[in-house]
């Protein structure tokens, strides 16, 4: 069993989410709740929330912010 597998898997999940966000925010702003895109990106809402926090600090080509909270966080994404 490889010790790098969790990192590789985490990086793949992060890249899959980032690609989804770039594609869907290409024409402007994108607003979403994690639970509504979970099936489309193949991640749980909890995984998406954790990755969004990570991406908001790391992604230089996207502007990501927690936009509002009503029963779940709404995220706002736009190209940087």
Image (cartoon, grey):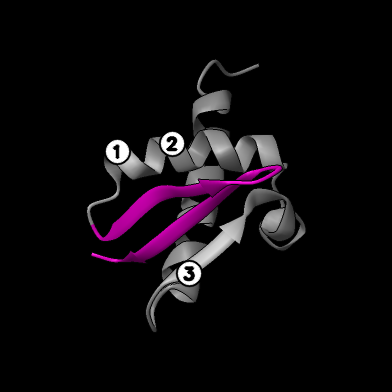
Left or right of 43, for residue 64 = left
Badge 3 element: strand
Image point 68% across, 59% down: which residue? 37
Instruction: First in sequence, mark 1 or 3: give its number.
Output: 3
Q: What separation in Å lies between label 1 and label 2 (alpha carbons)? A: 7 Å
Q: Which residue is mark 1?
A: 57
Q: Residue at x 73, y 50 (%)?
A: 35
Q: Residue furthest right?
A: 39
Q: Quadrant of the C terminus?
A: bottom left
Which residue is tagged 3?
30
User: Left or right: 61 with respect to 74?
Assistant: left
Q: Which residues are magenta?
A: 61-80
In the picture of the structure, the residue carrying the numbered disc 2 is: 53
Crowd tier of the residue under label 3, counting other residues whose Cα lies within 10 Å: few below 14, some 14–19, many 20 or above: some
Residue 70 in percent (x, y) is at 65, 46
Q: Position of residue 7 (x, y in %)?
A: 49, 27
Total marks shown come to 3
14 lies left or right of 27: right
**Cα distance between the residues tagged 3 and 2:** 16 Å
**Upstream in sequence: badge 3 or badge 2:** 3
Q: Would you say the residues marked 1 and 2 are in contact, meaning their CB atoms lie under 8 Å apart?
A: yes
Q: Quadrant of residue 3?
A: top right
Label 1 to label 3: alpha-carbon separation: 18 Å
Q: Residue at x 22, y 53 (%)?
A: 60
Q: Nearer the viewer, mark 1 or mark 3?
A: 3
Q: Secondary structure beneath disc 1? A: helix
The image quadrant where one finds the N terminus is top right
- In the rendered image, residue 76 lying in the magenta stretch gets the answer yes
Q: Secondary structure at mark 2?
A: helix
Say if 70 sits above or below 79 in the image: above
Mark 2 crowd level (few <14, some 14–19, many ≥20, 10 Å Cα): few
Q: Main secondary structure of the magenta part?
A: strand
């Amino acid at each position: 069993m490889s010790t790098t597998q969790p990192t590789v898997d985490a990086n793949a999940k992060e890249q899959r989410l980032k690609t989804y966000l770039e594609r869907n925010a290409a024409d402007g702003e994108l607003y979403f709740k994690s639970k509504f895109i979970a099936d489309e990106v193949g991640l749980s809402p909890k995984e998406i929330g954790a990755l969004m926090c990570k991406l908001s600090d790391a992604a230089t080509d996207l502007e990501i912010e927690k936009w509002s909270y009503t029963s779940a966080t709404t995220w706002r994404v736009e190209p940087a």
